[in-house]
Image: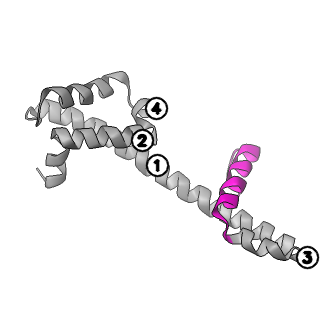
């Protein structure tokens, strides 16, 4: 096994995994009760997971959490790109109408996020 897998199979690695999942909200939202119980019991009972069956089950839970994490990153990237595209369009239009302060809108990430969410809520898909 590699060093990363060894870390996940020790108490410290499992604690770190659980804490990270709780912070991002995927602990309750994306894991069913049995997955959460599996990790919690492994943390309480053993300093290091030695059972191949338990290790396989833990890696299954880890892969669920990694899949959620990767999809969240992809969604955030799409939202940011779409929002910035909309912000550039609105900035350009407002500048043509004489609003000189609108130049800053094109690079304002908060404004871009707002526009992406509004667009998603209105149309159901992000304007490309």
Residue at the (66%, 59%) spot, across then down: 110
Residue at the (73%, 65%) spot, across then down: 87
User: Label 4 belongs to which residue?
Assistant: 29
| Marks 2 and 1 in Cβ contact (< 8 Å) | no
Q: CA distance from mark 3 to mark 4?
A: 47 Å
Q: Closer to the camera, 20 or 84?
A: 20
Q: Give the foreground label among 3 and 1.
A: 3
In which quadrant of the rendered view does residue 31 lie?
Answer: top left
User: Label 3 belongs to which residue?
Assistant: 98
Question: Percent x, y for residue 39?
Answer: 25, 30
Q: Give the foreground label among 1 and 4.
A: 4
Mark 4: secondary structure: helix
* Quadrant of the drawing holding the C terminus: bottom right
Q: CA distance from mark 3 to mark 1?
A: 40 Å
| Marks 1 and 4 in Cβ contact (< 8 Å) | no
Q: Earlier in the sequence, mark 2 or mark 4?
A: 2
Q: CA distance from mark 2 to mark 1?
A: 16 Å
29 relative to 50 in the view: left or right: right
In which quadrant of the rendered view does residue 99 lie?
Answer: bottom right
Residue at the (81%, 73%) spot, across then down: 101
User: Label 2 belongs to which residue?
Assistant: 23
Question: Percent x, y for residue 58?
Answer: 23, 35
- Residue 11 in the magenta stretch? The answer is no
Residue stretch in magenta: 107-127
Question: Percent x, y for residue 11?
Answer: 17, 38
Q: CA distance from mark 2 to mark 4?
A: 12 Å
7 relative to 64 in the view: left or right: left
User: Label 1 belongs to which residue?
Assistant: 71
Q: Earlier in the sequence, mark 3 or mark 4?
A: 4
């Amino acid at each position: 096994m590699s060093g990363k897998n060894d870390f996940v199979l020790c108490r410290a690695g499992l604690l770190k995994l659980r804490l990270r999942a709780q912070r991002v909200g995927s602990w309750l939202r994306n894991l069913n009760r049995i997955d959460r119980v599996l990790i919690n019991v492994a943390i309480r009972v053993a300093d290091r997971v030695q059972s191949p069956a338990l290790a396989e089950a833990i890696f299954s839970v880890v892969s669920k959490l990694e899949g959620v994490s990767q999809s969240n990153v992809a969604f955030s990237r799409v939202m940011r790109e779409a929002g910035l595209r909309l912000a550039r369009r609105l900035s350009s239009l407002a500048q043509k109408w004489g609003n000189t302060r609108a130049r800053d809108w094109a690079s304002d990430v908060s404004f871009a996020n707002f526009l992406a969410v509004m667009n998603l809520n209105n149309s159901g898909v992000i304007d490309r």
